[in-house]
Amino acid sequence: MDKLTPLLDRAPTPEAIRQLSPADLPRLADELRAEVIAAAAETGGHFGAGMGVIELTVALHHVFDTPRDRLIWDVSHQAYPHKILTGRRDRIRSIRQRGGLYGFTKREESAYDPFGTAHSSTSISAALGMALARDLTGGDNHVIAVIGDGAITGGMAWEAMNHAGSLPSRLIVILNDNGMSIAPAVGALNDHLSELRKGRLPSVFEGLGFRHEGPVDGHDMNALLAALGRARDSEESGPILIHVVTEKGRGHPFRAPDKEHYHAVPKFDPVTFAFKTAKPNAPTFTQVFAASLIAAAERDERLVAITAAMPSGTGLDIFAERFPHRTFDVGIAEQHAVTLAAGLASEGMTPVCAIYSTFLQRGFDQVVHDVALQRLPVRFAIDRAGLVGQDGATHAGSFDLGYMSMLPGMVVMAPADAAELRRMVATAIAYDEGPIAFRYPRGEASGIDDPQERRPLAIGRGRLLREGGDVAILSLGARLEAVMAAAQDLAAAGIEASVADARFCKPLDAELVEGLARHHPLLVTVEDGAVGGFAAHVLQHLAGRDLLARTRFRALTLPDRFVAHGAPAEQYADAGLDARAIAAAIRAALTV
Ligand SMILES: Cc1ncc(C[n+]2csc(CCOP(=O)(O)OP(=O)(O)O)c2C)c(N)n1
Ligand SMILES: CC(=O)[C@@H](O)[C@H](O)COP(=O)(O)O
Ligand SMILES: [Mg+2]
């Protein structure tokens, strides 16, 4: 490997890169691109975005005095080349694995990561905060935010530009325009950027008080060095935006074209470049959701589906193939997605807002103020609930049970398997008395499935799956499989467990919960959500009926800390929520 990357070996840090002559930098970029490909073959992960900013990454570290000059990558899924150039090359093959480098920038990981990002559109706000701190403390360093054309569709970016454009603070924003979000970029801003790429000015950024440079060819090293150098050396106050045009996935080694420009890739063979994908055992929860939604939309012509820039991740790309005019991709705009759904519901439509749990956090006030307060029947399909694996803590869907179930009038369901998800989709579509949510995890949906079974569930009714007198386990959501395995394990040790699937976090099945409490010496709740979710509701319900004197209680939730990245099985073991840990916790409780 070393012989193939002589410059990269000589210049493993930004300090050394700055010693290289500009004439050497295109070669360094080529070596860096080869290194990103070689590492990705071993690890998989976010790929296309980094491949598109290879030259930009080299140029930034050459021109600016990082880490003294602050460099913030928006989302930072494109930061693998940055990690390689900032002293983490020796660990790049550990990325996204347990104990390895994080898949996004992280303050604890490196001084070259001055701000952690992963949820999009935060970079300009954070950079402006750093620029103001610099000005207030008499500093003279540069602050640079690199934001993609997808990320800049997020409302926060505009709030930050609105603020920055009115200030004299020096701030450099680099708009990395590759015409792509995860899917092709959407919206009027994308149309405007197309015009700017053709050199048709004035730009909306100038109207907001930014100096504007570009478009600059983001793969032309000399052009990049010149533009960045001018921004660095300029004496002018206020913010500047440099519009850099790049190609997502530039230089990828794969044969077939990919509609998402290899946004994320599995591991692949470094010689043939064939992907190493495991054969699926079952459809994913996302696929089950999409198929169920299509079936529902065939019957309800008012059903419309909304995604905030995640059509493939939420399965709405499949829905859009069947119902293109009833699918809305609003860009990275979760807040707008929620209130848009509220507006649609207020006119009698049947809106389904499909958003990852972690990203719906962005739209929380909209869920409260625009949906719940008005009791509007918006259906929330909350994907990626629970631990998500390699994307780690920034992407974990830990909090939705808490933040949705605390809202008056909100119905919250969690399916244990594919069959349950089908019925919950049907339940949500049939329910029009107010808002309703169902939350389901990343990955394959286990369980015996009957694709024709689409009967809606009775609201607030769970199910008893197994009876035993020593302990009752009340499970919510997809940990049920681990719970059943734990119950079997306990049975082998002579401990008989009742197991129930609550199905609803809200409203609770009072009869079921109370019955379990009355008839078992120990009641254990299990959920793949944070403290303050399902268990809190069960506990409050039992306390209110003085039933805690009838049973002892244990809550198995995610721990009160952020769970590190790794394979989902490793994460659930770490969180104490795999079958072994559940059985162990019950045994321990019974021996107290
Ligand atoms: C708030 C939020 N919503 C959704 C996402 C998921 N997401 C990650 S990258 C991405 C696309 C970003 O596009 P762009 O900024 O243009 O970067 P590119 O991948 O094109 O380099 C999306 C939608 C996210 N990270 N944060
Ligand atoms: C960078 C980002 O936020 C997305 O690409 C995210 O990693 C997608 O996650 P899934 O792989 O679960 O769709
Ligand atoms: Mg883009």
Image: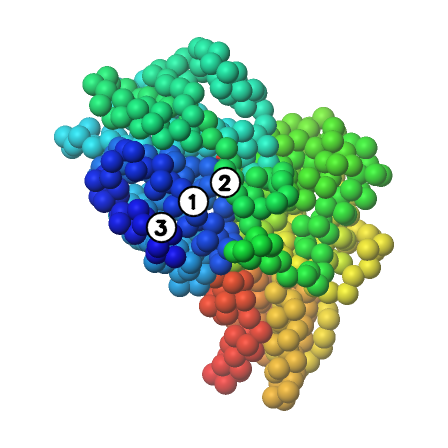
Q: Name which residue type carries label 3.
A: Thr
Q: Residues within 10 Å of mark 3 (few under 14, many from 20)?
A: some
Position of residue 121 measured from the top left corner of the image (x, y, whole percent): 44, 34
Q: Which residue is mark 1?
A: 33
Residue 73 falls in which quadrant of the image? Answer: top left
Can residue 549 be seen at all in this image of the molecule? no
Q: Which residue is mark 2?
A: 251
Q: What residue is shown at x 59% (from left), y 79% (from top)?
A: 521
Ligand 1: does it lie within 8 Å of the C-beta at label 1?
A: no
Circle nearer the N terminus (2, 1)? 1
Q: Residues within 10 Å of mark 2 (few under 14, many from 20)?
A: some
Position of residue 458 measured from the top left corner of the image (x, y, whole percent): 77, 54
Q: Looking at the image, which is closer to me, 387 or 198? A: 198
Q: Is residue 294 above or below residue 137?
A: below
Q: Are marks 2 and 1 in contact (CB under 8 Å)?
A: yes
Q: Are marks 2 and 3 in contact (CB under 8 Å)?
A: no
Residue 315 located left or right of residue 206: right
Q: Looking at the image, which is closer to me, 81 or 130? A: 81
The residue positioned farthest toward the bottom in the image shown: 494
Q: Are marks 1 and 3 in contact (CB under 8 Å)?
A: no
Q: Which residue is mark 3?
A: 5
